């Protein structure tokens, strides 16, 4: 197994509050890592730290991705290196056409990889096939980015972006929250289709359901800003029965 | 990281701030009856025009500069300004135009040789106080369209000028309009005859070049019954530490079933971040929808000037006539803009639409001021106004002053206003997808202005979008 991301003694704060208190976590190429933990454990902060959100300040430790420290990199540089995060609450951007945004993002990535940009026609073809696969409405192409989308549509739009951008390291921050069972199946199916021997997933969730559809290789339990336990799906079984208290305190 | 960095993106240089190295003849500073006689003589004007100018001058002397706009600037010394500057060499015929001027216009993206021109765009090039070249005149004449400088129109089409000049903006309308009426130098005259759809975009490019001079242009556009014209104006000026005054008057007349589209891309020198230099832009623009079913559309992209005072308006006199106002105003650096529109409903079933987008960055102050006035006679009148403001950073401001006067119970008036900030979350979302911070800001701003930019004729929409990017380069903070 090849380590794709190594998180070493990571301490981070938002404002004055220290939220991550020494995270140690290895994630592997081609594997699915589920991150679980009670509210306030630091799950979302961990993903924000990985993608370089400006609210988060790293005070100690490091994140090594593909052999390089990324903590001083700009968010867009990290994205171009293949790190993608689906947002828990995707923001609305009025007047910015969804398709235009997606093409700009894809072409930024292609440029980074030394590929020539896709023209509008080529891109539209790609976009339409992905939209069809996901069972999304075609009018999504013409709408403004996330504006007036329902909760489910926003989540599907995140998955659509993942499919178009084909990232190497995918963080799904509560992708399952607010989805009905059909949408959850659809999203899970899309994620499973993206799984391959190279791509790594980090799935943050509160619920077992999504892990029934997307079987994780590893389950990590976070509490109080630390990784409390690492194991397989059996951890989820234990959690279901007993709750987070069985793992004691960090 | 974050918004401080974005600050860099807005600090772009003003790329049109060069000086054209030509000899110009300028009038000595000061404004007296003699100045006006001098201007009138320079233009070989008939006596009736000089008399009108002097009448305006005497009225202006008794008027006071308006103080109600939300802008502050040191007092203007009207006696310290020169009211006339013109290139010494040549005019009109291309062979005679100073090659330096041709080069300068080319640099501004406005080639004056017809074979090099943008397809389908005829240009009147005004440098300081004179029109140096008007293109495609003969071709347009074949259709009966008059497209010339206002100076030529006064000499060659006195009946039209006498009938329409001051008919929409009376010479004593306001302080700056009166000043303009007294000292106006050049500008554009357009007449579209009955039933003619003008096949080209008509445009004027105004350039201030001479130091310490004001530019006082005057434009008059008449669209006769059932005609159509799309007109565009652009402008720029050298970067200087002194302030220069630009006080223009534009009058539009749309007869029955006529439609005038008037677009402005205003890029006068904006001054610097401390408020040094920059153009004072005090402009009166008004259109009269004279006939039934007539329509006037104002579209403006305002990025320049240190002070802007400008309210392109429509008088909706003809029944079923329509007035539209689409505006994007950007204030950054230490710019202050007080801009908006007036929609005066007089005829039955008249409609007006106002879409105003204000963007403020750095120390910019942006005010929307709009009046919707519905006369008793305007049965079934409708207005919809939308005024949105976008703030970039914490030191700028956005203000909205809507005024409504309705004397008609059957009228419908709707007003919506929003103020938003470019949020860290929007920027971060786009950056997480690999889009650079600069492109992300540009994308959000373009999205915000989309409804207005889409209204510009295609050739100018491209220019406006590029200008927005240039303007905002380094501007968020």
Image (spheres, rainbow, N blue to C red):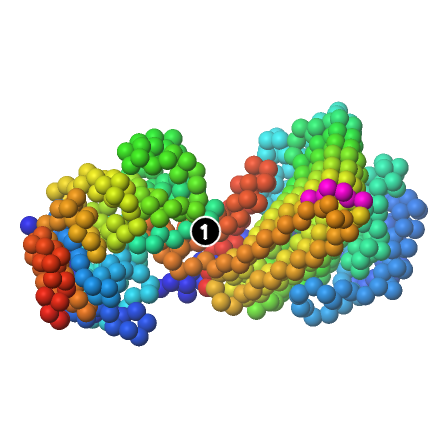
Determine the residue positioned at 62% across, 52% down: B415
Viewport quadrant of the C terminus of chain A: bottom left
The one of B331 and A39 positioned closer to us in this rendering: A39
Q: Which secondary structure type mostly characterizes the magenta part of the structure?
A: loop
Determine the residue positioned at 66% across, 65% down: B70
Q: Is B470 rendered above or below residue B95?
A: below
Determine the residue positioned at 49% across, 51% down: B445
Residue A208, given in percent of the width and then of the height, sits at: 17, 52
Left or right of A51, for residue B270: right
Q: Is residue A67 visible?
A: no
What is the quadrant of residue A57 in the picture?
bottom left
Q: Residue furthest front?
A: A241
Left or right of B158, for residue B139: left
Residue numbers of the magenta segment: B377-382
Q: Residues within 10 Å of mark 1 (few under 14, many from 20)?
A: many
Q: Is residue B466 visible?
A: yes
Left or right of B431, for residue B248: right
- SS state under label 1: helix
The one of B244 and B436 positioned closer to us in this rendering: B436
Q: Is A199 rendered above or below residue A219?
A: above
Any magenta on residue B380? yes
Callout 1: chain: B
Question: Which residue is label 1 attached to?
Answer: B444
């Amino acid at each position: 197994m090849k380590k794709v991301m190594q998180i070493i003694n990571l301490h981070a704060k938002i404002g004055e509050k220290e939220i991550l208190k020494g995270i140690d976590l290895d994630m592997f190429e081609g594997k699915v890592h589920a991150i679980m933990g009670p509210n306030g454990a630091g799950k979302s902060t961990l993903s924000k730290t990985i993608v370089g959100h400006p609210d988060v300040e790293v005070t100690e430790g490091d994140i090594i991705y593909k052999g390089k420290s990324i903590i001083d990199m700009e968010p867009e540089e990290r994205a171009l290196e293949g790190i993608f995060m689906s947002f828990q609450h995707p923001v609305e951007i009025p007047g910015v056409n969804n398709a235009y945004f997606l093409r700009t993002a894809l072409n930024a990535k292609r440029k980074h990889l030394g590929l020539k940009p896709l023209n509008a026609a080529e891109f539209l073809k790609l976009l339409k096939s992905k939209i069809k696969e996901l069972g999304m409405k075609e009018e999504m192409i013409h709408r403004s980015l996330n504006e007036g989308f329902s909760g489910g549509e926003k989540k599907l739009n995140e998955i659509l972006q993942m499919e178009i951008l084909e990232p190497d390291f995918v963080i799904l921050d509560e992708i399952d929250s607010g989805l009905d069972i059909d949408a959850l199946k659809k999203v899970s199916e899309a994620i499973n289709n993206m799984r391959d021997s190279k791509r790594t997933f980090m799935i943050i969730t509160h619920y077992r359901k999504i892990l029934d559809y997307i079987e994780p290789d590893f389950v990590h339990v976070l509490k109080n800003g630390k990784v409390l336990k690492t194991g397989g799906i059996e951890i989820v079984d234990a959690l279901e029965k007993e709750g987070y208290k069985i793992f004691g305190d960090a | 990281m974050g918004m401080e960095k974005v600050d860099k993106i807005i600090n772009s240089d003003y790329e049109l701030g060069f000086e054209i190295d030509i000899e110009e003849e300028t009038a000595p500073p000061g404004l007296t009856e003699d100045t006006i006689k001098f201007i009138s003589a320079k233009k070989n004007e008939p006596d009736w025009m000089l008399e009108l100018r002097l009448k305006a001058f005497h009225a202006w002397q008794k008027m006071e500069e308006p103080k109600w706009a939300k802008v502050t600037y040191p007092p203007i010394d009207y006696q310290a300004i020169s009211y006339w500057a013109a290139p010494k060499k040549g005019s009109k015929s291309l062979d005679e135009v100073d090659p330096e001027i041709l080069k300068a216009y080319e640099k501004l993206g406005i080639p004056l040789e017809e074979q090099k021109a943008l397809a389908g765009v005829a240009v009147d090039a005004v440098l300081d106080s004179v029109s140096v070249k008007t293109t495609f005149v003969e071709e347009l004449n074949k259709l009966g369209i008059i497209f010339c400088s206002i100076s030529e129109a006064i000499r060659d089409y006195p009946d039209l000028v006498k009938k329409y000049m001051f008919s929409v903006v009376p010479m004593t309308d306001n302080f700056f309009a009166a000043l303009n009426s007294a000292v106006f130098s050049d500008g554009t005259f357009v007449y579209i005859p009955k039933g003619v759809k003008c096949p080209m975009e008509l445009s004027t490019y105004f350039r201030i070049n001479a130091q310490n001079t004001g530019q006082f242009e005057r434009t008059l556009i008449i669209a006769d019954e059932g005609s159509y014209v799309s007109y565009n104006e652009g402008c720029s000026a050298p970067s200087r530490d002194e302030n220069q005054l630009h006080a223009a008057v534009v009058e539009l007349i749309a007869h029955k079933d006529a439609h005038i589209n008037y677009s402005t891309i205003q890029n006068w020198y904006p001054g610097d971040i401390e408020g040094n230099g920059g153009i004072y832009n005090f402009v009166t623009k008004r259109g009269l929808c004279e006939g039934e079913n007539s329509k006037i559309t104002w579209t403006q992209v305002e990025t320049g000037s240190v002070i802007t005072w400008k309210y392109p308006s429509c008088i909706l006199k003809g029944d079923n006539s329509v007035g539209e106002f689409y505006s994007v105003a950007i204030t950054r650096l230490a710019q202050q803009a007080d801009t908006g529109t007036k929609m005066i409903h007089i005829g039955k079933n008249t409609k007006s639409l106002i879409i105003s987008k204000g963007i403020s960055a750095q120390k910019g102050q942006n005010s929307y001021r709009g009046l919707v006035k519905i006369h008793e006679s305007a049965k079934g009148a409708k207005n919809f106004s939308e005024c949105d403001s976008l703030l970039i950073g914490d030191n700028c401001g956005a203000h909205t002053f809507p005024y409504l006067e309705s004397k008609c119970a059957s009228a419908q008036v709707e007003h919506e206003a929003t103020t938003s900030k470019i949020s860290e979350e929007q920027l971060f979302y786009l950056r997480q997808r690999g889009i650079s911070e600069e492109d992300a800001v540009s994308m959000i701003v373009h999205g915000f202005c989309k409804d207005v930019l889409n209204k510009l004729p295609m050739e100018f929409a491209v220019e406006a979008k590029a200008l927005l990017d240039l303007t905002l380069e380094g501007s968020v903070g």
